Image: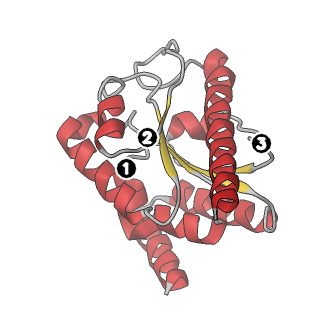
Amino acid sequence: MQRLRERLAWRAAIAWGDTPSVQRHRAIADRIAETAGRRRWLLLGDSNAAAAAFGEACGAVPVVAAFDGATVETFLFADRGAGYASRCHPLVIVVALGANDAASGSEVFAKRLQRLRVRLRRWPVCFAAVPCGALAEVLPGLAHALNVPLITTGTYPSHDGKHVASEHRAAWARDIEAGVAGLVAFKADAQTLNTAIA
């Protein structure tokens, strides 16, 4: 069933002329395959994430599922976000979206983010603060309302109001990696504590 969904998503993307998205989808599938058997963390993101280079966090390698122009709806479409997660089995999923969602407004963004959280309920999920843009102030309240951890990042300069300036992308990526490492370590400590109590 999952493969059928993926094929339908690819066909829809091709029909819409979204060839770069199809190529990126295949690259993500390849990354999932090449990291099989390793601890992984999954990042669902937009062009900010696609342009950044992420490294290991607490021994877990990143699988970056990021697309130029991506919105929360990108990962709701054909259950794309849940599809990546089910094949990846991540320790944690980081949702780093919002730069392209401003056009739909904060209420629509909140509803879509809530739907995405529900679809990803089988995995630990956290949000990464939007580094710049109109929704930067909205996300902390949403994370609190949805009871989802928020990785806070620095405030980074932007040349266009949506994208982290290229000279600051590495620092933004390190902030996210540090947040993932903290969440993975916290999860491991909680599991150890639960085992000791049992």
Q: Residues within 10 Å of mark 3 (few under 14, many from 20)?
A: some
Q: Which of marks 3 and 1 is nearer the N terminus?
A: 3
Residue at 69% over, 50% down: 188
Q: Is residue 164 left or right of residue 170?
A: left
Q: In this view, does 84 lie to the left or right of 158?
A: right
Q: Is residue 171 above or below residue 43?
A: above
Q: Distance between the residues labelled 3 and 1?
A: 25 Å
Badge number at residue 56: 3
Q: Earlier in the sequence, mark 2 or mark 3?
A: 3
For the C terminus, the quadrant is bottom right
Q: Is residue 189 left or right of residue 131?
A: right
| Tag 2 and tag 1, C-beta contact below 8 Å | yes
Badge number at residue 127: none
Amino acid at dot 1? Val
Eye-nearest disc, 3 or 1: 3
Badge number at residue 72: 1
Residue at 46% over, 75% down: 11
